[in-house]
């Protein structure tokens, strides 16, 4: 077997550019992106004005005791060296500081990588300039410092994606981001003692317009998105400029940016009035005096006029930064006072335990940490936001635009007897996909729990008609109806869904005094990986059987799913066991009116892998007795387990199935209950009272259906989801098999289940360390949090979850971190 | 009393510009908006090219038997008359048709209103040109016709909002839309016999960029939104043009427009490649040859080169139009086959009954009707999309942008132990607003029903602790807990919510075999308006009381709410009645562990106005017995009844309250259960098992909380909601009082309730015509549908619902329609 390090190396070589990035952004000093709605609107002049306003304050606070530093970064420059925005800022400030002749001033200008020196690729550059001015009379304070840096420069004066294509080849987004992060850190900290207090300010000036492509072709508004730096937008004061400015603003908002100010040049058209009105005065619109055509005086006169605007802009940016930090800092305390979290014992949550999430980009959270004057750091959301979230960064942007579109087009539209495009498309896609071959109707509701309540109502009606319990429209109570269900199952938290699950921590009098548990609950056999082997574990009630099934093992997961197991002795044992239980159930207790189960994996119950053979046999027995079959695919559906539905893994179909969570790509609540025509028919009649009278105001809401339609298509299309193999029916293996096997052999690990986007493991634990209320995994997860992996345990069961589009390389890196920390964890224990 | 017609006239005079518009758009011929990402990108050249391609087809189908007509509309023209885009199209086509010299050609050019003739306002214009060409040899077909029209023209070459301000004063949006509708109808139909088949095509060319202001200051993308015409976007082929094109596209999408093609001029920068990649090839990007600087040959050579592009563009537009119509036409049938609507007896729904909703804009649906080759018509959504929808057109656009922002910034982020801005802001706003003075915690869930299930769990826990039923963490079943509730109430469709309501059509064995009704249900006294008088109706059980309360009436609604009624004899009677019922309830049946009720109005139960005095007394009795009080404000909350919460109308506070529906402005599902500190405290302990273990994956989802935070603020701020009076605490009267009184005296009407955004009336009916399953109101609502009012009955109760920002003028117009149809309805009966 390969060692862990050689495995890692192999991966690294193959996929260095897809590395799981842990970007981190210090918040000590204000750092802004400068965007523009078009080229040539004076972005660089604004940057220079900001630098001047910040570094050459008027009236001068003499002596300037505290060092002031302005960092100007130009990540992408084309038309170089004749065009150099950082050179422009450098020269402009040098001239202005000389003219001001007041206090010491230090400026440098550097180009880091350029194709201008080397026609055949990017080379480290030797372009470097410095300017030092000792200051006027009595200038005894610390010098003002200006650092201007160009990160990547190309010769041709075209868009960076074209220049890169022609001169150097594409530059990966991750390379731009990594260098930007490094230059921010260095630029703000280099040459500064740890104790020294510096007033620093940084602007990162983009190239072209907000949606101009970067050197990989990625639009710049998408490229820089992981940092989500606050922004200022240089708008357009020309005729027609209102439109471009508003549209650029909207493109930034659509990607989750916060714009703190809009700046335009005065062209006598008072564009600031409609812009201010559009922004409802919430974002200031600042107007710069008209820029003279003749730039021979280095704009010194113009700058004098503009000074008051720049000062106000700097103030706006500084105070927006301070407010943001304050808000982020205060959030845990405030949240602790007003929020009541689900599944959370507030007494056990201290302020430090609360995670402040500033944003998310694809699979990663951006988390605020209060240390070191505040820092924003990336964490892989291994809860895939609590079992729902599916998009990578690309799909997230697509969905954001679609959400805006759906809200803009429909707002909300009531559903009964109405049809509108997203609802119809979503219903069609569900029946062609998840319901293919069996379902004929789609019933929408709001979440998994409601979809289950609806499913139960459907099943009981069908059962009642099939079994002659109801043959007219009378509403009288005829008999007690029960569900057949599995212990360890979970179907939701509303009472109807609770009643269909076995007694558990969730169902006691303490939680819901109305719970009675209206089910006949079977202990299912489970499957798990341990010591490199897939094992079947039979429940107590089945072990007494004459045959010895103690050591049923499989060498691969595929064997577990193989339908040739249907002919095994075990299959017969399962069948007899189920039939016996059903027959022994006294009719006086009620009739079993529905089978309900989570196919393949019981999620909330602890990530248990139920033997698919058992579930298939269960379905067959119920079908033979005309008991409607409900699959609860709320957790398992939509690629969670590597196929669009878990039913495909079982190789059998239900009469009713429930979907939610990942159905919308995991960004917005929506649920669907699919049903066969036979089920639908039992609600047809002459009276409205016979119809299914269950609904929610937002049934099939336009945004949810739009997100679902997009995601359902996106996830299964190999053009949009690179993980799709096997003619659109399977995800490739996301969790490195060797690493999974290594973990399954780890002494701290009881069992592992890796399937589709899920990799779960149970830590070996006993007594109070085991079970849902256990805090056993806490120290391990804390360490993983430091590694940038955000996890939440199910007692002593921990899991990683990714999206259907997440690259196996990222999964591998995250799983490796888990493996490493496991070692440490078991050493400490 | 004023007559109806004089009332109408008075309203009309006062508010003619706010009239309830019933825009209607025929779909027989393709009609497109031509947008541009900036000025001067060749929009008009594209329009001319489309006209040429459509009117002068190559190869010529000779003889041209079918008439072809191209309608070019320029709604807003500045710089007139020296700039005239419709003049340009007219001249270009005249030249091209002469040059082609093939078949008869007829062109006209007209300017309808202009400030150029009259410095002091808009005047009907006399600018008019015509061109007639008889065609070349053998030209025996019908002539091709070109109609070019400018609707409004101003002299100065600035943005329309500036030109209008300086020359004519603002032109109302409704005036632009009304004229556009008229010109579309006339232009496409004038001079055409009814039987004659004409191939027509229309483009409406906008001015400037997509977000350039129109003459009222409204952005053009918002101005034209009610029509939601399909669009083509003329993008920018210059350096930097990718960005502007993408941003303009996104601004259109954010407003729900469908863009069928993007056209750019070739500038050698292959902008079409990144544009195509951004659009994922779903929208074609067409490239026009570079436009020569020298236009002396009338671009005839250029047009020859561009012809193939225009032909392809026309094809794209024609086929997109045909596909759209086909899809709209097929939707009812398809929906009838795959969708299972809630609360709908499918057997009673024929294809004709299904409403096809193409979009909504503010309060209005745009509905597709198949008649006359298809037409899109506006309907006032009087169900305010089933009791949720609140925004007018302005707020809808704001929310659409915010939804894009929230999805772009957060996607979805799991909630427990996490905090992120929208969730915190929403929680804070809820506690400062709806929960002010009593609530200290906000618990989020997905919909009204789940918020009720949570409220019940909270109340029972609090009750159990207060009454010594639970004093440790044991989960054993201790006693039966019941709710005290009102008959006629409705709390949702999940089992727990159902159990808290009295038996009804919704709760029988047929609907939910598990329902038992765990409540002590009181018949409440109700209030209603009839014959201009507010009356109290006492339930059977109370009438036997010694005093005679047969004729309790009020002259105004305010009197009903007046707290000085607390000292009345009736109050004492209520109190005695409630106490007696509670005392008579046998403990062996269980304990009353919570009071749950909808304050003021019972919605789904039939829009019953419960006597607020009774509810206040009920709250006081329960409070004295330490029974937790739940207000179900799912329907009544957030201005539905004219105040932020109905609790304000009652002048008392609950311990727990549930909100949903309008909380997000009514566009996306989200619910909150607010609770006092005492309730929260009963979940605090050392074990997680004592925490409230109820949650949904999308708890406090970012989009929902963002929409809620925006809407909560928007609705109560007089700067954004003109209906706010009384220092932000009340909506002004939306339903004309006189008209409401007139309706209350109508012989067909049993009772009326008008409060806040709700105006409900019960039709006088008996036997099967009364009650939830009644179809009595059907014919009336069908007529109102023809009037452009979309309603859905609750049996023989019908209602109008608007948003908190809807203008009283619109409400008045809609209510007038109801009044008129009532007359007709009662005559027919």
Image (cartoon, coloured by chain):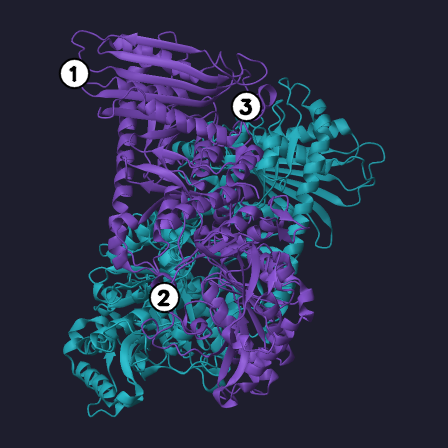
Chain colours: A cyan, B purple
Q: Position of residue A705 (x, y in %)?
A: 37, 53
Q: Which mark is residue A239?
A: 3
* Mark number, residue A451: 2
Q: Is residue B633 visible?
A: yes
B371 to the left or right of B219 = left
Mark 2 or mark 3: which comes first in sequence?
3
Image position, residue B69 (x, y; %): 29, 21
Looking at the rendering, in which quadrant would you find the N terminus of chain B? top right
Q: Name above or below for residue B99 compared with residue B416.
A: above
Q: Which mark is residue B62?
A: 1
Q: Nearer the viewer, residue A316 or B693?
A: B693
Which image quadrant for residue B341?
bottom left
Q: Are marks 2 and 1 on the same chain?
A: no
Callout 3: SS: loop
| Residue A733 placement, left or right of B821 | left
Badge 1 marks a residue whose secondary structure is loop
In three-dimensional space, the C-alpha distance between marks 2 and 3, rounded to whole angstroms, equals: 54 Å
Structural distance between the alpha carbons of marks 1 and 3: 46 Å
Residue at the spot x=36%, y=72% of the render? Answer: A742
- Subunit under mark 1: B
Chain of the residue under the numbered disc 3 shown in the image: A
Residue A376, quarter of picture = bottom right
x, y percent for residue B542: 54, 75
Residue A40: percent from left, percent from top: 54, 27
Residue drawn at 60 percent across, 67 percent down? B441
């Amino acid at each position: 077997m390969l060692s862990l390090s050689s495995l890692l190396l192999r991966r690294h070589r193959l996929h260095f550019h897809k590395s799981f990035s842990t970007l981190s952004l210090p918040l000590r000093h204000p750092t802004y992106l400068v965007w523009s709605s078009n080229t040539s609107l004076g972005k660089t002049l604004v940057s220079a004005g900001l630098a001047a306003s910040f570094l050459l304050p008027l009236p001068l606070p003499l002596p300037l005791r505290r060092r002031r530093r302005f960092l100007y970064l130009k990540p992408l420059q084309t038309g170089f060296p004749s065009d150099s925005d950082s050179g422009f800022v450098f020269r402009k400030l040098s001239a202005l500081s000389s003219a001001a002749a007041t206090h010491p001033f230090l400026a440098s200008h550097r180009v880091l990588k350029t194709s201008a020196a080397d026609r055949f690729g990017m080379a480290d550059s030797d372009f470097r300039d410095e300017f030092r001015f000792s200051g006027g009379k009595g200038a005894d304070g610390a010098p003002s410092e200006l650092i201007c840096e160009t990160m990547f420069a190309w010769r041709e004066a075209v868009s960076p994606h074209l220049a890169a294509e022609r001169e150097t080849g594409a530059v990966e987004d991750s390379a731009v981001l990594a260098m930007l992060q490094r230059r921010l850190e260095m630029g703000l900290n280099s040459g500064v003692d740890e104790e020294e207090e510096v007033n620093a300010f940084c602007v990162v000036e983009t190239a072209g317009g907000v949606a101009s492509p970067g050197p990989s072709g990625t639009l710049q508004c998408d490229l820089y998105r992981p940092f989500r730096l606050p922004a200022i937008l240089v708008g357009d004061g020309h005729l027609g400029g209102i439109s471009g400015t508003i549209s650029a603003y909207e493109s930034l908002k659509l990607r989750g940016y916060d714009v703190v100010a809009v700046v335009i040049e005065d062209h006598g058209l008072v564009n600031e009035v409609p812009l201010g009105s559009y922004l409802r005065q919430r974002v200031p619109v600042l107007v710069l005096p008209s820029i003279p055509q003749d730039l021979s005086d280095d704009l010194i006169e113009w700058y004098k006029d503009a000074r008051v605007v720049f000062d106000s802009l700097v103030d706006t940016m500084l105070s927006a930064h301070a407010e943001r930090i304050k808000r982020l800092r205060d959030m845990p305390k405030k949240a602790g006072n007003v929020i009541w979290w689900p599944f959370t014992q507030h007494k056990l949550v201290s302020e430090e335990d609360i995670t402040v999430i500033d944003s998310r980009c694809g699979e990663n959270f951006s988390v605020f940490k209060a240390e070191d004057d505040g820092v924003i750091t990336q964490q892989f959301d291994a809860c895939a936001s609590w079992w729902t979230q599916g998009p990578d960064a690309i799909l997230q942007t697509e969905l954001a635009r679609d959400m805006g579109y759906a809200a803009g087009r429909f707002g909300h539209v009531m559903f009964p007897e109405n049809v509108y495009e997203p609802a119809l498309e979503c219903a069609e896609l569900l029946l062609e996909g998840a319901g293919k071959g069996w379902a004929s109707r789609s019933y929408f509701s709001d979440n998994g729990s409601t979809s289950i309540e609806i499913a139960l109502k459907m099943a009981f009606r069908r059962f009642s008609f099939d079994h002659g319990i109801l043959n007219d429209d009378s509403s009288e109570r005829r008999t007690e109806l029960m569900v057949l269900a599995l212990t360890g199952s979970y179907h939701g938290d509303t009472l109807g869904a609770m009643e269909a699950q076995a007694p558990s921590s969730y169902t006691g009098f303490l939680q819901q005094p109305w719970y009675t548990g209206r089910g006949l609950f079977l202990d299912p056999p489970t499957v798990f990986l341990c010591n490199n082997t897939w094992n079947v574990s039979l429940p107590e009630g089945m072990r007494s059987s004459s045959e010895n099934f103690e050591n049923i093992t499989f060498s691969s997961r595929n064997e577990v799913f193989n339908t040739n197991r249907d002919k095994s002795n075990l299959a017969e044992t399962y069948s007899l066991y189920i039939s016996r239980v059903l027959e022994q159930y006294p009719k006086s207790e009620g009739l079993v009116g529905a089978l309900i189960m989570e196919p393949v994996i019981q999620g909330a119950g602890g990530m248990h892998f139920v033997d698919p053979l058992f579930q298939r046999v269960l379905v067959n027995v119920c079908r033979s007795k005309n008991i409607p079959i409900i699959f609860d695919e709320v957790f398992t559906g939509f690629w969670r387990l590597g196929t669009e539905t878990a039913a495909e893994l079982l190789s059998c179909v239900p009469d009713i199935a429930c979907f939610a969570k990942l159905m919308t790509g995991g960004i917005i609540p929506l649920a669907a209950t699919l049903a066969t025509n036979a089920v639908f028919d039992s609600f047809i009649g002459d009276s409205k009272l016979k119809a299914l009278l269950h609904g929610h105001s937002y049934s099939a809401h336009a945004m949810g259906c739009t997100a679902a339609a997009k995601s359902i298509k996106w996830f299964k299309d190999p053009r949009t989801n690179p993980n799709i193999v096997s003619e659109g029916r399977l995800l490739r293996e996301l969790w490195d098999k060797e690493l999974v096997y290594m973990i399954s052999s780890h002494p701290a690990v009881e069992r592992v289940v890796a399937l589709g986007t899920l990799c779960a493991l149970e830590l070996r634990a006993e007594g109070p360390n085991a079970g849902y209320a256990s805090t056993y995994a806490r120290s391990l997860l804390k360490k993983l949090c430091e590694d940038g992996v955000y996890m939440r345990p199910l007692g002593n069961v921990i899991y990683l979850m990714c999206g259907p589009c997440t690259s196996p390389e990222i999964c591998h890196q995250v799983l490796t971190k888990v493996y490493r920390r496991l070692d440490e964890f078991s050493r400490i224990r």
